[in-house]
């Protein structure tokens, strides 16, 4: 946007709707990030309970607690502390954990890779299953595959991921002994990593698969029934499978990808519980521990990273949508 | 697209169930009363569950869910006085399932009623007044939606201490934004309708328009959404209880029963599998009921 001062006439950045869209979205994303971090701070600070007492234990004397509070400036007004923290963040310093004195950045860099691997694995499982099932269901709506698929997916949507996790552990770890019940990564080989992440990834991925399948099937059917390009393709004599896969699917897939991006926030919520059940040393695990200890810098650091991920994912969804759909790209509204 | 979807942590699944178009409804092809089977079966199931959890214990044939005799610990199923046996400390399992369901359902209803009233009003106000009010409300909702609500719920439950009431507070952070977004989208659609214009021209005051013209038109969608929301809330309540931040033991809830049973799962799988099954069937029944109602709403 700064181009405007340099170039005569309307700036290129402003003439490109896609860039203008990114600019607009970024402009709304930044206040959201402020809001999220402020809210976290407010919730943890304003609610009853005391970090110092929590960390030192019930047996700590009044003097010890006071000393700890002084050391960490816990007695400053809460707004002062928020802006103090914000100032540090803008210079790249996320602070140290109150509990372990470890830098928050190192806690993040320890946990994030594992969590992202888990999420990527879960998304992979769900998408790999979704596309063929949705295609089969949409090929013959109301048919056998469609009915079974829809019933299964409704059931899958009603299963809590922690219930699924517990049942998976019972069947595959306790009864059959095929996969480990908890995360083990002693040797650090990819094989072991995949093995220990399989059950948690299924627990997260299966409900997603059910959710995505319903969406994708409905969207493909809508394309097949209403869109001119499908009629054209059929009129040309293109076979039914080819119309589905080459014409309808790509269009529907864009919509699905948008939903996947919008859903990243929900996914992160799921990892907190699943990581706990399988003892996966990811970011959700650290988060729960930090919330229980009222370890404000760690909670803030993790929430900030997660909020940034959610905001970027939403931004990508919007931009992807605009880039792929010419009607939005050129500023005309989609019908 | 984003504006239409009441997207949220919890809203995600329910929201998409609520907006996903249904193509080729098989129910429409049937004749007579079987046409409504998709409504009757889940409705009956919900009725049965409500009866079991809220009415059946009143007849006094169910032992109390806590304070069981330690001598009855791990009693097998169908033993004397314990229809489904007892848990590790001798509490009757059947009774804990029913009372646990009562806790889960009470929390879910409270959270969704609060969400419907508060969120519905917020969303309708925002859409009705538009401009500044709308922008501010939507920005606040954006923050709540970008925020991993589970973190908020965990933080609230942790600092207030685990209790039923605090679980309700915490879960309202999921329900209120989701309902608000839906109510806003629905109200926006109404704003251009002739009867709204007529009401405005007739000099009807805003509160009356909201109450008499907007509310009856957006309520069906909100109630359908609430049914889907009950399922989601039961799952979330279980999650909080599972993490030790929901209904505090020894008071039962399906979530904390699953959590407690997990430790002895290889020896006594029923302590985990039975509450899991109840949770699943309840959520499924509410989802099917909401889904069937939504399909009817779309058709008309």
Image (cartoon, grey):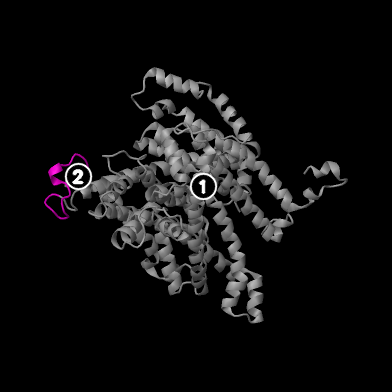
Decide: is A59 above or below A105. above
For the view shown, which residue lies furthest in the front direction? A187
Q: Residue at x 55, y 56 (%)?
A: A260
Kindly identify which chain the residue marked by label 1 belongs to: A
Front position among marks 1 and 2 = 1
Q: Are marks 1 and 2 in contact (CB under 8 Å)?
A: no
Residue A112 falls within the magenta-colored stretch? no
The image quarter in which residue A331 lies: bottom right
Residue at numbered disc 2? B91
Q: Residue at x 15, y 55 (%)?
A: B78
Density class for disc 1 (Cα within 10 Å; few <14, some 14-19, many ≥20) is many
Q: Residue B262 location, x and y as percent?
A: 29, 50
* Residues drawn in magenta: B64-81
Which one is nearer the viewer's eye here, A47 or A179?
A179
Say which mark, if any, is on residue A198.
none
Residue at numbered disc 1? A112
Decide: is A215 above or below B61. below
């Amino acid at each position: 946007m700064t181009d405007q001062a340099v170039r005569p006439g309307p700036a290129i950045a402003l003439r490109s709707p896609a860039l203008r869209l990114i600019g607009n979205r970024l402009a709304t994303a930044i206040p959201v990030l402020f809001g999220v971090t402020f809210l976290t701070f407010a919730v943890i600070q304003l609610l009853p309970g005391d970090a110092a007492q929590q960390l030192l234990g019930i047996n700590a004397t009044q003097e010890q607690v006071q000393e700890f509070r002084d050391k960490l400036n816990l007695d400053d007004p809460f707004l002062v502390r928020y802006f103090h923290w914000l100032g540090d963040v803008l210079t790249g310093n996320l602070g140290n954990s109150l509990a372990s004195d470890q830098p928050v950045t190192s806690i993040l860099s320890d946990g994030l890779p594992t969590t992202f691997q888990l999420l990527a694995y879960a998304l992979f499982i769900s998408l790999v299953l979704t596309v063929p099932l949705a295609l089969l269901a949409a090929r013959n709506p109301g048919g056998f595959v469609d009915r079974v698929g829809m019933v299964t997916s409704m059931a899958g949507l009603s299963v809590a991921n922690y219930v699924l996790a517990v049942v998976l552990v019972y069947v595959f770890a306790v009864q059959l002994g095929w996969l480990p019940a908890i995360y083990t990564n002693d040797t650090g080989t990819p094989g072991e990593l995949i093995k220990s992440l399989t059950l948690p990834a299924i627990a997260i991925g299966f409900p997603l698969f059910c959710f995505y399948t319903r969406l994708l099937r409905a969207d493909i059917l809508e394309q097949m029934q209403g869109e001119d390009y499908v009629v054209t393709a059929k009129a040309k004599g293109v076979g039914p499978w080819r119309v589905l896969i080459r014409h309808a699917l790509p269009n529907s897939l864009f919509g699905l990808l948008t939903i996947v991006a919008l859903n990243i926030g929900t996914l992160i919520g799921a990892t907190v519980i699943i990581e706990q059940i399988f003892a996966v040393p990811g970011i959700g695990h650290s988060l729960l521990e930090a919330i229980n200890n009222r370890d404000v810098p760690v909670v803030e650091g993790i929430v900030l990273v997660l909020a940034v991920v959610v905001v970027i994912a939403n931004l990508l969804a919007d931009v992807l949508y605009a880039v792929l759909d010419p009607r939005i790209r050129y500023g005309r509204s989609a019908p | 697209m984003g504006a239409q979807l009441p997207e949220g942590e919890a809203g995600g699944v329910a929201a998409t169930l609520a907006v996903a178009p249904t193509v080729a409804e098989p129910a429409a092809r049937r004749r007579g009363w079987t046409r409504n089977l998709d409504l009757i079966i889940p409705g009956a199931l919900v009725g049965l569950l409500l009866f079991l959890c809220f009415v059946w214990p009143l007849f006094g044939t169910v032992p109390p869910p806590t304070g069981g005799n330690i001598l009855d610990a791990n009693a097998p199923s169908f033993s004397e006085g314990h229809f489904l046996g007892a848990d590790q400390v001798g509490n009757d399992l059947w009774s804990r399932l029913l009372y646990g369901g009562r806790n889960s359902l009470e929390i879910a209803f409270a959270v969704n009623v609060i969400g419907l009233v508060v969120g519905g009003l917020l969303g309708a106000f925002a859409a009705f007044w538009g401009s500044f009010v709308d922008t501010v409300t939507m920005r606040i909702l954006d923050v709540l939606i970008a925020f991993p609500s589970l973190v908020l719920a965990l933080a609230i439950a942790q600092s207030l201490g685990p209790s039923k009431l605090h679980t309700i507070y915490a879960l309202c952070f999921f329900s209120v934004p989701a309902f608000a977004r839906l109510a806003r989208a629905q109200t926006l659609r109404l704003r251009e309708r002739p009867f709204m214009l007529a009401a405005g021209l007739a000099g009807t005051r805003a509160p009356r328009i909201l109450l008499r013209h907007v509310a009856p038109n957006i309520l069906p969608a909100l109630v359908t959404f609430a049914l889907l929301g009950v399922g989601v809330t039961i799952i979330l309540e279980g999650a909080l209880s599972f993490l030790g931040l929901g209904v505090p033991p020894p008071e039962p809830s399906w979530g904390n029963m699953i959590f407690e049973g997990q430790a002895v799962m290889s020896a006594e799988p029923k302590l985990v599998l039975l509450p899991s099954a109840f949770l699943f069937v309840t959520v499924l029944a509410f989802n099917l009921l909401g889904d069937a109602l939504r399909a009817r709403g779309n058709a008309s």
